Image: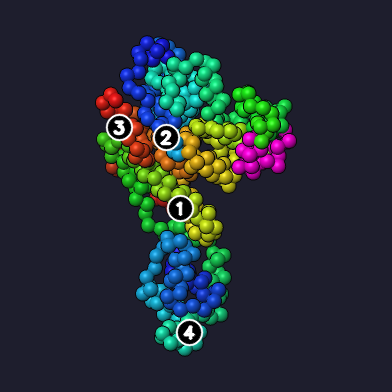
Amino acid sequence: MTATLDQPTQRRPVTGAVLELRSVSRVHGQGPTAVHALREVSLVVRPGELVAVMGPSGSGKSTLLTLAGGLDPPTSGEVYVQGQALSRMSAADVARLRRRSLGYVFQDLNLIPTLTAVENVMLPLELDGVRTAAARRAALASMTQVDVEGLADRFPGQLSGGQQQRVAIARALVGDRRLVLADEPTGALDSDTGEAVLQVLRARVDTGAAGLLVTHEARHAAWADRVVFVRDGVIVDTTGVPAEPEQLLEGPTC
Amino acid sequence: MSIRQGLLALLAQQPMYGAQLRVEFERRTGGTWPLNVGQVYTTLSRLDRDGLVEAAGGSDEEGRIAYRLTAAGREAVGRWWLTPVDRSDHPRDELAIKLALAVTVQDVDVPAVVQAQRTQSLRGLQDLTRLKQRATTEDDLAWLLVLEHLVFTAEAEVRWLDHVESRLLRRARTAPASCTPLDAPARQVTR
């Protein structure tokens, strides 16, 4: 991280990108035992674009997602969210950005067992100072999108795995999320329910959000506009020819 | 699937003439297996010869003859629905052959072969998924099922490629690369 701070980035972030990873590396540990989880990865996600990241376990795909969400800083390189370099923001500002603009769907759902389903969905808004009544309205609207509004007052322990997953999706999409990050969001769901989750994610992206989806299932990755393949911390291939961003990075300083 | 069985299945619903059969077949399979009308008429005349269909009456003003199933035809359709599809007569899979050769021929970058195929398969899957999204909206169940079959087949190929890759990696870690000697005993695959 210090390397990034010491060497001001020479180029501006890609115009209009919701998420940009620029030459991002993440090393865990030091010396001969250091693990290079990501090596100089660059990736741009624009509004209305869903990008899937595929790779075997340990390839770095989940690390990529945690860096994109500002949950962990890169060892070198820069992460821009809505044109802002995360390394130059205060911790409080990154936290605010996460609460307001980012939605996460984790592999483990992280629902709080002592809160009802709707309270779980309201949580990111309430933490951000939205009043209870408004937060509840927004939460119910988000739950309606994934057909779980009828379960609003149940506790996570009273819901099936698939219902919990939908509640977690509703929480990730509540309010005005510009960037949705999903790590195996269909894990543990049967084929049909898993697909319903992707439909919701796709629909949100189609209304202008940007999405980054980590999955090892080809059938799910296929919902994305572009699939990137990660091996040993490096992007080795991609299905799509996204607009110019990747080439832009190689181009002259703008 | 043979055209023969497909036409019999359609005629089980109602008598139809050739052009109608062609349209119905394509409509229900989303145009995945286009037929030409010549194929349809050739097949109909063979089915007639074999006693499975018969003319449902004289020709109409445009000279078209509608066909219907005979009792033997109805029986054949009933048997067909309940007979599992035999996959063993499918042509050899070029991809399987290519990879089998790739791992035994020196200086082939097998991971690159696998990745090139995987990327291509994913592109195909993306196309199918887009078609599927449209089909879901239009609530066209027959077409949706055909698409999903193609989706699952493509997915199986990608999963197999993932498996090939991890097997190669494991092999590379445990033993130095070696080619199968040319005189190694051949194995027969029975399906």
Instruction: Compute the Cα span from label 4 to label 3.
Output: 65 Å
* Residue pointed to by mark 4: B55
Amino acid bearing label 2: Arg
Question: In the image, which residues are magenta?
Answer: A138-159
Q: Which chain does tag 4 point to?
A: B
Depth check, front residue: B18 or A124: A124
Q: Amino acid at mark 1?
A: Leu
Q: Residue at the spot x=65%, y=31% of the render?
A: A135
Q: Which of A104/B154 is in front? A: A104
Q: Is residue A81 above or below residue B62?
A: above
**Any mark on residue A247, and which?**
3
Residue B61 shows in the view: yes
Location of residue A83 with respect to B165 vertically, above or below: above
Q: Position of residue A172 (x, y in %)?
A: 58, 32
| Mark 2–mark 4 distance (CA, rounded to whole Å) | 61 Å
Answer whether labels 4 and 3 touch (C-beta < 8 Å). Answer: no
- Circles 3 and 2 on the same chain: yes
Q: Which mark is residue A46?
A: 2
Q: Is A39 drawn above or below residue B81 in the view shown?
A: above
Say which residue label 1 marks: B131
On whether disc 4 and disc 3 are found on a single subunit, the reply is no
Subunit of label 2: A
Q: Secondary structure at mark 2?
A: loop
Query: What amino acid is at disc 4?
Result: Ala
Determine the residue positioned at 45% across, 52% down: B131
Q: Of the residues under marks 4 and 1, which one precedes in the sequence?
A: 4
Check whether the beta carbons of the residues at disc 3 and disc 2 lie within 8 A of each other: no
Measure how far apart labels 1 and 3 are at the Cα level. Answer: 30 Å
On the same chain, marks 2 and 1? The answer is no
Q: Residue at x 31, y 30 (%)?
A: A248
Q: Amino acid at mark 3?
A: Gln
Total marks placed? 4
